[in-house]
Amino acid sequence: MSHIRVVRSFVAGPALAELINQEYDLGGVAACKLFSKMLRTQDNDHYKVTVGDRKYVVRVYQLGDHLRRQESDYEYELDWLNFLKEEGLPVSYPMPRRDGRFLGSLNAPEGQRYYALFSFAPGAPMEMDNEEQLFTLGAQMAKIHLVSNRYQAPYERQKMDLDFLVDRPIARIKRAWDNNREFADDLDLLITSAEEARQEILDIINNPEHTPDGWGPIGGDFHSTNTFFTDDMSPTFFNFDLCGPGWRAYDIAAFLQNTDLINTSENLTEAFFAGYYSERPLSNNEHAAISPLLTIRRIWLTGTFTRNDVPVGYSFIAPA
């Protein structure tokens, strides 16, 4: 056999460092090490880059086929982050290459993969039992939404609409589960839940009330693990790979789903919402949309992790 298809590869750290030294002027020689990858191999690969005592992170994006990504999707993310940085929002931002661009590409065994170098987020992951941090996160999320009303995207990016969040994930799940009787009941429940949540969102969209800035650029995946706080309570947000045009209420639902905050503590949940409301009160429609969007977020996650090209695999080698 002269050629065999590869679905997942990892770039060697020294080889990536060599590429970074060629493409970036960082004022010194860069070294590069892959962050730990034990699970979630369907995610992007992140490497810690050091130049003397300075630190950066380089992300090598996974092959774009699964989420139907093209070059403009990556360009949108990097351009939006630069916009947020210029507006004074605390985000990890891309570093410019020697050619002035922010996005690079490399030829991996599975195909073309894009990469970008980012500023390093100082501090430690936010503490989910810290009301002050939750208030701050809520307030900063709202500020990102408000500031982004002025963002004029020069690049196309997939919209996080019902096709992206519901229809395509359900189609993917059906392809994987349809012929497996073991999953028949689960599949029926998922489809029913998806249809009901989808209709709820359509009813909200089509009712007489309207939220002028209810749709716009969003982070798409706010999480306690991609929000770092320093000792003086200054946050930095990073990992905006799932950003794009979407409902602002979806950002809230995704954060609640990611952290299970709503099932943890009423006081902690209120601290987050108090922070958000301090900058941008939710409309009645947005508040009503959070519940069906929580269901939709679960559907989307299930569909995203349902893959037949299996960098995820289907079973552990040994039983737990």
Image (cartoon, grey):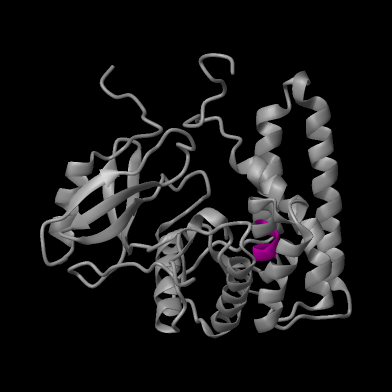
Which quarter of the image is occupied by the N terminus? top left
Residue 183: percent from the left, percent from the top? 76, 25
Residue at position x 69%, y 52% in the image: 257
Please give the count of numbered marks on the rendered protein: 0
Which quarter of the image is occupied by the C terminus? top right
The answer to whether residue 214 is seen in the rendering is: no
Whether residue 309 appears in magenta in the rendering, the answer is no
Identify the image quadrant of residue 55: bottom left
Left or right placement of residue 11 versus residue 77 in this view:
left
Residue 59: percent from the left, percent from the top? 35, 53
- Depicted 121 relative to depicted 59: above or below: below
Residue 303: percent from the left, percent from the top? 65, 41
The answer to whether residue 77 is seen in the rendering is: yes
Residue at position x 44%, y 67% in the image: 231
Left or right placement of residue 165 versus residue 15 in this view:
right
Residue 265: percent from the left, percent from the top? 75, 56
Left or right placement of residue 77 versus residue 275 in this view:
left
- Depicted 285 relative to depicted 293: above or below: below
Residue at position x 63%, y 57% in the image: 129
SS majority, magenta: helix
Q: Which residues are magenta?
A: 250-254
Foreground residue among 277 and 98: 277
Identify the image quadrant of residue 261: bottom right
Q: Which residue of the protein is positioned furthest toward the left in this rendering? A: 28
